[in-house]
Amino acid sequence: MMLVLVLLMEYRDRGLFFGWPTAQHKDKISRKLRLPQGPINLVRKYHGYAFSWAVIYTFWYHPMENTWGHAFGFIHTWMVMLQGSLMYTSLHRNRIWRLVLESWVTLHGLIVAKQTGGPDLNGTALWPMFCFGFLWLFTMTQLFGLTFWKKAPWWTKAIPFLCYLAVCVWCYSWIPDKNGNYFVRLQEIIRIPAIEYICVIFAWFVIDMFLRIKTKLTSTEESEMEIRSVSPSPLWETFYIACFMLIYSLMVLVSFLLQEFDLTLDLIALMVILVFIFILGTGLSFMIIEPVMKKRSGKTQAAEYSKSVGMANTTGESAGYPSDDQSDMTKKYAPTNDGNNAAFQSDH
């Protein structure tokens, strides 16, 4: 779930495929296929709550074993915890640090799969699927968050992925399937990236749907005036927060029930089901917590959604949400009235 939401957050500045499509791409096809920024901005603003739940829940149920796989898992958990504590600092937005956090799962997945998979000669080794699956994401998507790619010639962006494919072909020339045939398992490298990309589109669609529903409910002039001038009462705030906590509790309950009733499903299928459920839950939680975390102007994200979508469709950027490059160049780190950093508030 967290990896999917990170892909969605970073979509604004690096797209999904070789740094495409972003606001830099002005051609007709890019403008038509680029996802509107409303759901992306909402995730960038409230992702900390979902990530905190994910990392604490992972730390809670993660078994303590003296293996390299578990050690790398704990290191990743601790790094994400550290990233949360670095909110409102420049390191929180450091692109290299963010790339390490996002791509660490490649090492973790490789080591865990190598420990738990069967002997290679039996065709049951799991490490190739996890290693090359996450490396696909690294070479096609994650790598292009680094700023130097924006100035690099377009044809150079395919070089890392072509090198990756060459390594895959070589490796699967000596990785057999259960019948001893080579190259047959090469198709499995697409499974993890395909799931991730599908889940990104699903996450965008779910949050967009929630935003549109909320916008319909608050689209009248009278409703907007009420939103801008009246804050939720303490009772309503308590209700919103209770619902917010209930959602994450239900997500834990779903995981518990799957374990309790020992639901037998394919590993990939179970992963997809849980990610879909957690994305639905986190998307709904963002909408519920938003009235409590309004801007100082009194406007919520939903109240401004129509305007943001209009701006995104024409310019590729939403009003009030500069790209990371714009934020880095302008260095708008002046403190606001409550001591928080104004530049970082656009992303949190």
Image (cartoon, grey):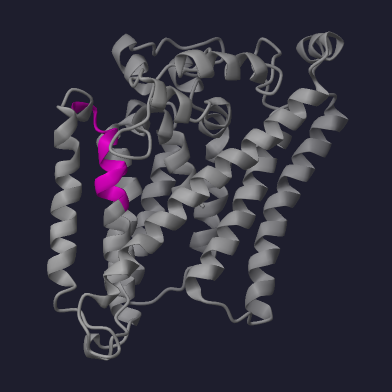
What is the x, y in percent for residue 35?
Answer: 50, 30
Q: How many marks?
A: 0
Residue 244 found in image quarter: top right
Q: Say whether residue 162 is left or right of residue 107.
A: left
Residue 340: tell me if it is visible: yes
Q: Is residue 280 magenta?
A: no
What is the x, y in percent for residue 269?
Answer: 53, 69
Nearest the viewer among 31 and 238 is: 31
Residue 72 found in image quarter: bottom left
Question: Which residue of the protein is positioned furthest toward the front in this rendering?
Answer: 28
Q: Say whether residue 176 is left or right of residue 315.
A: left
Name which residue lies at 24% across and 32% down. 146
Nearest the viewer among 213 and 323 is: 213
Magenta range: 137-148
What is the x, y in percent for residue 348?
Answer: 52, 28
What is the x, y in percent for residue 75?
Answer: 34, 58
Q: Is residue 147 magenta?
A: yes
Name which residue lies at 19% across and 73% down. 172
Q: Main secondary structure of the magenta part?
A: helix
Name which residue lies at 14% across and 61% down. 167
Residue 252 found in image quarter: bottom right
Q: Is residue 84 above or below residue 77?
A: above
Q: Is residue 104 above or below residue 49?
A: below
Nearest the viewer among 13 and 19 is: 19
Residue 339: tell me if it is visible: no
Nearest the viewer among 310 and 91 is: 310
Q: Say whether residue 275 is left or right of residue 306.
A: left
Name which residue lies at 44% across and 49% down. 197
